[in-house]
Image (tube, rainbow, N blue to C red):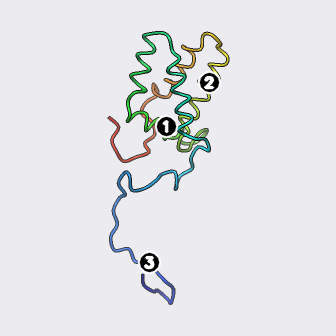
Amino acid sequence: MGKYREKLQARIEKIRPAQDGEYDLQSILPSTPHNIDEMAARIDRLVTSITDPHLKKLMDLIFSNPQFIKEYEHCPGGSKWHHNYLGGLLEHSLGVAELCDFIAGKHLHLSSSCWLLHPVLQGPPHPTSTAPFP
């Protein structure tokens, strides 16, 4: 600390980019108001309920990747319009999948599964870390 024109001033002598794990994005960026762990559990229940063996295998392959899950659960749903905050993609995907589940009734497996895959098929999620996505 120092003084400039009789006011306290912080002096920064060295600066570097923060590394993953040194900061919490939710403390500095807008985030979903919903509990991410609860939403992830609801997604897991939808994936677990799939009975078609081929679709089940595909969904299990995708949703068993820890790196994907970490990004999927925390990335924004978009950059401008709706769900544009941390956890927004999970919140949006879950809401649409549960709506499809409700509407489709007994034919929910294909409907909700397709909506869970919808953001995956659009491309990589918006990055929320400095780590490369494999």
Q: Is residue 133 left or right of residue 42?
A: left
Q: What residue sits 51% from the left and 26% below the top?
A: 44
Residue on which disc 2 sits: 98
- Location of residue 112 (image quadrant): top right
Q: Amino acid at mark 2?
A: Glu
Q: Amino acid at mark 3?
A: Ala
Q: Residue 33's mark?
A: none
Give the mark nearest the N terminus, 2 or 1. Answer: 1
Q: What residue sits 46% from the left and 81% below the top?
A: 9
Give the mark nearest the N terminus, 1 or 3. Answer: 3
Quick check: marks 2 and 3 in contact, CB under 8 Å? no
Q: Which quadrant holds the N terminus? A: bottom left
Q: CA distance from mark 2 to mark 3?
A: 51 Å
Q: Residue furthest bottom?
A: 6
Image location (x, y in percent) of residue 23: 43, 55
- Disc 2, SS: helix
Residue 13 vs residue 55, the one in the foreground: 55
Image location (x, y in percent) of residue 30: 57, 50
Q: CA distance from mark 2 to mark 1?
A: 16 Å
Q: Is residue 134 left or right of residue 36?
A: left
Q: What residue sits 61% from the left and 38% below the top?
A: 82
Image location (x, y in percent) of residue 6: 50, 90
Residue on which disc 3 sits: 10
Residue on which disc 1 sits: 73
Q: Amino acid at mark 1?
A: Glu
Decide: few, some or many residues near mark 1? Use Cα within 10 Å; few <14, some 14-19, many ≥20: some
